[in-house]
Amino acid sequence: MGGLVSPSSQRSRMRLVVVQVLAFSLFATLFVRLYYLQVIGGESYQAQAADQSVRDIVVQPQRGLIVDSQGRPLVANRTSWVISVDRTLLGKLEEKQRTELVRRVSVVVDATPADVEARLVTCGDPGSVRDVCWNGSPYQPVPVATDVSKDVALRVLEQPEDYPGVLAEQQNVRSYPRPFGINLAHVLGYLSPITEDEFDIAAERDDRSLNGASVVGRAGVEKQYDEWLRGLPGYRRVAVDSMGRVLGDDSLVESTPGDTLVTSIDAKVQAVVERQLAERIKVQRATLDPVTGRNYEADSGAAVVLDAKTGRVVAMASQPTYDPDVWTGGISQAELARLYSEKAGTPLLSRATQGQFAPGSTWKPFMTAGALTNGYSMDTVLPCSSGFQVGNRVFRNHESAAYGSISFAQALEVSCNTFFYRIGYNFWQKFGSDPADIDARDPLVEEAKKFGFGSRTGIDLPGEAPGRIADRHWKQAYYESQKDYYCDLSSKPQTADTSDFVYKFSREFCIEGNLYRAGDAVNFSIGQGDTIVTPLQLARAYAALSNGGTLYAPTVAKAIVSPEGDVLRRIAPRKVAQLDVPKKYLDYIDSALQGVTREGTMAWKMIDFPLDKVTVRAKTGSAEVYGKQSTGWVASYTKDYVVVMMISQAGTGSGSTGEGIRAIWEALYGIDGETVRPARAATPGTVPPARLPQFLADGSIMPPVPAKATR
């Protein structure tokens, strides 16, 4: 009996064996797994672990230069210390640690914790503030302060334990060298951070020139040629510890600088134009308006200088203006509001390309061309009476002056309104005496459109305004869009808030606001009424008078040059149309406009100017606007240049801008008294350079090589 094993003992022994087998199996499994992780898959997991300890930082490229026709930098770059915060690491901190870190950052950058927090919020998220929030990549460190001092940057760099996840690094930002003190803000434009939508579109197109921290052009040539200027970003991989502190560089892909934009702007001429425009506005604001009995408002103005032979923009100024550097590093809400403020004069609006004004008598040369090509002759003589009656209204000549029977040339010299009233009225009677016929022919309207009015010039600047030709079709469309408003206003009893004029106008407009009457036609003939133009449109049309009838699309850019100095693209003048005005008529108008500066309305501003050596043609204009003071214009040209200046609410054309126009011509040709500097392409402002600046191997830029030129 003693040699037998009980059943219970056998079961215990079996359990022990099973447990031993299970334990062995578990250890075997763990050993195999460990062998796989350390030996077979070791390299893969080591690589993944390394990836967790490195971080990609975008290295923004240096944006391309913008230079003038002589190679002078108009926009360059400078380095700026920027303090950024890594939001990925910030999110890993406890609430108390996060609050303390934000407080430390706010102290070191001289801001409030609320300001820092606002910059860390992604645009579009709850609590985001426009123009303060971050609209870049969520994985990119967020800049919370730019242009900080070197001492601040060193403090962050030398105390990483106090500023975990906070970066201090130098970045390239835009700078404005301002040769000759120029502003040129509306031509150059500005930059702002890329939006989320733009970033998504770039990602869809696999556009690697943009990333979540990019800045892009928003206006001017910065926007028009953004793709050339922006360059290609690089990437720097850095090793970091568990707290996000940078331990060292892992690898680097260099960024590629943007290309250089060569413009046709001459900074020396631009400086004169800006100074004269600002000075004339200042003078007129201190001058009494005899009509209103108060000083002129002179609320805004513009000036344009074109190369008459090519349409290139030599100078362009607008007032009021702004400091282009205000956008560098981000703009505050208060600053942005001021740029859009009507009280401040809407400084962001370029009056040269976006301002639209009645042209006044500067319109008359084009009406002359329309008349001469549609039945009138150069021998035509018409009365220049003090007034011209249309229906029950008398349209007056300026200051009710009368000059007897005169020719087209004399009418341009003395700027006779009643002479052109008769032409406009005659064409209305001949072709369109039915006010409701919106398809009636109008030779003067046709001619204005041929000279490019009523449509954009095609300049290589964004946001250009089209102007307006107030013909029969426009009047019908305007009536349909406004009829309900005015009919509703006129159907109600007149209140104290509604003037007699407005109430009467509303009733008349409701009944017959679509009719194109004789009064509309005579107003059109002298550049009054609802027709409006931009200063650039007017300059372009006068260039066509100068060069024999070629209408160009004005251009600011001349070429794109690589960082190595190679010309990547030449931007040639672009011909839009060739006018079908016979040469004899253009010559006749040209001769008449010479008379304006010698004996006509501009002569008193050109006394002792050497007109025999520099033959300036001109036309003055004073456009009347209901409820405002007159807008003053002078449009002038030689065979080389066109110079146009206008000032809103500043009085007569020659009275408000005449001295400024003369000063610009003196600067262009180097006139000192009656001495004229010899025309040489090497002399800035004398003859527009045909060649590009020289880009040398050491990165320096030299003026163009002189080319033989004649005036």
Image (cartoon, rainbow, N blue to C red):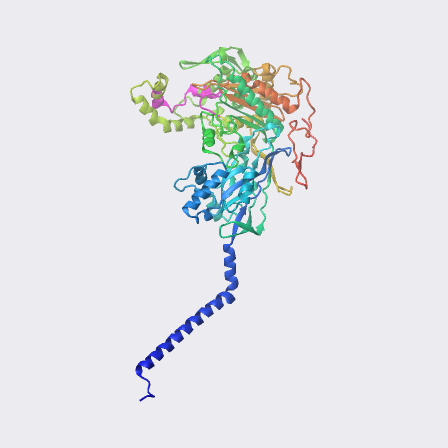
Quadrant location of the N terminus in the rendered image: bottom left
Name the spot of residue 552 as percent of width and height, x first: 56, 32
> Considering only vertical position in the picture, is 173 above or below 496?
below
Residue at (46, 70) in percent of width and height: 31
- Taking depth in this image into account, of 334 and 266 the one nearest to the observer is 334
Q: In this view, does 362 lie above or below 150?
A: above
Which part of the image, by quadrant, shows the C terminus?
top right
Residue placed farthest to the front in the image? 2
Q: In this view, does 478 lie to the left or right of 105?
A: left
Q: In this view, does 669 lie to the left or right of 357?
A: right
**Is residue 227 shown to the viewer in this render?**
no
Instruction: Please give the name of the residue rendered at 51% of the width and 10% of the height, measured from the top-left corner.
Output: 402
The vertical placement of 243 against 518, above or below, is: below
> Does the magenta-highlighted stretch encompass residue 513?
yes
649 to 576, vertically: above or below? above
Region in magenta: 507-532
Q: Which of 566 and 485 is in front in this view?
A: 566
Residue 695 seen from this side? yes
Q: Position of residue 54 (x, y in %)?
A: 52, 53
Of residue 235 and residue 570, the one placed in the foreground of this image is 235
Q: Position of residue 220 (x, y in %)?
A: 53, 34
Count every numbered label the image shows and give the total: 0
Residue 680 lies in the magenta-colored region: no
